[in-house]
Image (spheres, rainbow, N blue to C red):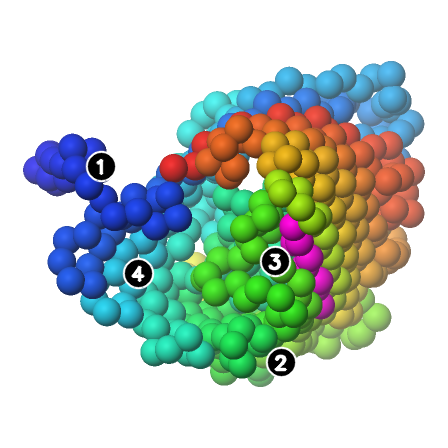
């Protein structure tokens, strides 16, 4: 109660003196001493959406090869589908940015996302990275600016992998990120704890960002081998992530990039990034003998991207962005992640497992796990008010298990691809806007089995955003 009263007093005082705050780009800052200030923001994105979906058919006999949450083409058809009508809070974020001494700042951000909608309005909000519900800490880091050429941040950090994943959710071009083509794991919504070094070199021509992060922890005896071969990260090595960007026009000097500057900068840049951790993923090879099927292998991802955000007149801007991502042995797709019945502890709490795999129903991949994806998006801002947007994204997973039944073990490629069109209406830039999108799947899910469209592939979304 005492803490609540103190917080309430601070908020009331802040409101009373708000007109006297120093202004920085239209955002109020409260100064409380030399080189000391605090800045509070709030982001709210509320959505209404309708997706084409099918009801579960528990009486249908699954066709050979069907797995997961698919609707079988022999038991359901297009005419059996209906359009859902849902409302949800996509994001509700509280942000605190402050300076406590010259060149020493910190940033903290909470999030409570995807509340409502398919979660039926219950307390089933954020799951990723926390396994908890409701509000959680998403970003929290201390930043020390040695110079423009070198800044050091430590804490929970948005990984410096690609331009798109490092962008702020406040200033996206479309309703959301191109989630199909951004699969950065393990992470807390693309964040990880660690230390990052970044800076601008040669008057902003080169933007570098890189760091050492937690990644996957050491986990022992997760397969059927003797020794360390099936230990995940046996030497407890960290994760290394970084990117390099070349700026041909304006530099992006903020911690977060923007995907939509609305004419405030001239951006023409290209870059690349990498994400690596030694022996972070346990893989499974069905063709090898018992006792040799499992092996911990290195996780590696790399990307190249292009960003153009260029004013072409008073209130008119052309925006174009694209990226290609290549991943091998993504940790959350490892064999140990999907085993449900294959291993039992020899004694409760011992951490030791039997050495005989008893079921193949849970495996999704064979051998090394290879994936790649890409996206391109474009928008045209007209008179600072209307912005048509088009996006295309695709993701391919190689050697995905199609039939996990009994002794049938068939692996092939799985591909998802989407075309999205939308329209943004800016009432007051990123502070108040309305966005509309329609997402359309480009063909069926190509896993080799006959599926009709997956749930929620065809989708209309209407979103309102407030940012203060």
Magenta-colored span: 303-311
Residue at the limit of the structure toward the front, as seen here? 314
Tag 2 secondary structure: loop
Q: Which mark is residue 106?
A: 4
Q: CA distance from mark 2 to mark 1?
A: 64 Å
Q: Quadrant of residue 292?
A: bottom right
- Quadrant of the drawing holding the N terminus: top left
Crowd band around label 2 with a 10 angstrom C-alpha radius: few (<14), some (14–19), many (20+): many
Which of pointers 3 and 1 lies earlier in the amino acid sequence? 1
Q: Which mark is residue 229?
A: 2
Q: Is residue 345 above or below residue 245?
A: above
Which of pointers 4 and 1 lies earlier in the amino acid sequence? 1
Magenta stretch prevailing secondary structure: strand
Viewer-proximal residue, 135 or 8?
8
Q: Is residue 444 above or below residue 205?
A: above
Q: Quadrant of residue 83?
A: top right
């Amino acid at each position: 109660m005492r803490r609540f009263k103190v917080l309430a007093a601070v908020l009331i005082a802040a409101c009373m003196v708000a007109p006297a705050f120093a202004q920085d780009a239209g955002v109020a800052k409260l100064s409380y001493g030399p080189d000391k200030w605090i800045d509070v923001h709030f982001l709210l994105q509320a959505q209404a959406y309708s997706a084409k979906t099918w009801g579960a058919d528990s009486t249908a006999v699954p066709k050979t090869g069907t797995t997961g949450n698919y609707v079988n083409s022999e038991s359901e058809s297009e005419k059996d589908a209906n359009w859902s009508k849902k409302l949800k809070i996509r994001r509700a974020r509280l942000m605190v940015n402050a300076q406590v001494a010259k060149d020493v700042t910190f940033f903290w951000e909470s999030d409570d996302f995807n509340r409502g909608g398919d979660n039926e309005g219950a307390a089933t909000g954020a799951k990723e990275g926390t396994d908890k519900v409701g509000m959680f800490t998403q970003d929290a880091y201390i930043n020390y600016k040695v110079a423009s050429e070198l800044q050091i941040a430590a804490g929970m950090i948005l990984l410096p992998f690609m331009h798109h994943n490092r962008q702020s959710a406040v200033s996206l071009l479309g309703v959301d990120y191109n989630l199909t083509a951004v699969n950065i794991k393990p992470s807390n919504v693309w964040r990880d704890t660690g230390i990052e070094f970044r800076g601008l070199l040669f008057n902003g021509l080169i933007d570098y960002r890189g760091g050492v992060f937690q990644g996957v922890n050491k986990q022992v005896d997760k397969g059927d081998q003797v020794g360390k071969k099936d230990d995940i990260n046996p030497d407890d090595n960290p994760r290394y992530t970084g990117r390099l960007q070349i700026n041909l026009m304006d530099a992006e000097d903020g911690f977060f990039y923007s995907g939509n500057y609305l004419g405030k900068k001239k951006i023409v840049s290209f870059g690349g990034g990498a994400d690596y951790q030694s022996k972070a993923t346990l893989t499974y090879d069905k063709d090898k003998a018992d006792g040799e099927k499992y092996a911990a292998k290195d996780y590696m991802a790399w990307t190249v991207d292009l960003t153009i955000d260029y004013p072409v007149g008073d209130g008119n801007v052309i925006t174009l962005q694209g990226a290609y991502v290549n991943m091998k042995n993504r940790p959350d797709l490892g064999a140990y992640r999907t085993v449900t019945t294959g291993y039992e502890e020899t004694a409760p709490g011992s951490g030791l497992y039997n050495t005989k795999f008893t079921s193949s129903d849970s495996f999704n991949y064979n051998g090394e796990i290879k994936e790649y994806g890409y996206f391109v998006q474009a928008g045209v801002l007209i008179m600072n008010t209307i912005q048509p947007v088009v996006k295309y994204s695709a993701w391919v997973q190689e050697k995905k298990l199609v039939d996990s039944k009994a002794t049938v073990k068939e692996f092939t490629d799985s591909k998802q691809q989407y075309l999205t069109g939308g329209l943004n209406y800016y009432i007051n830039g990123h502070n108040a806007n309305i966005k509309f999108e329609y997402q359309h799947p480009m063909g069926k899910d190509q896993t080799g089995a006959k599926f009709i469209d997956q749930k929620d592939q065809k989708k209309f979304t209407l979103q309102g955003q407030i940012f203060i």
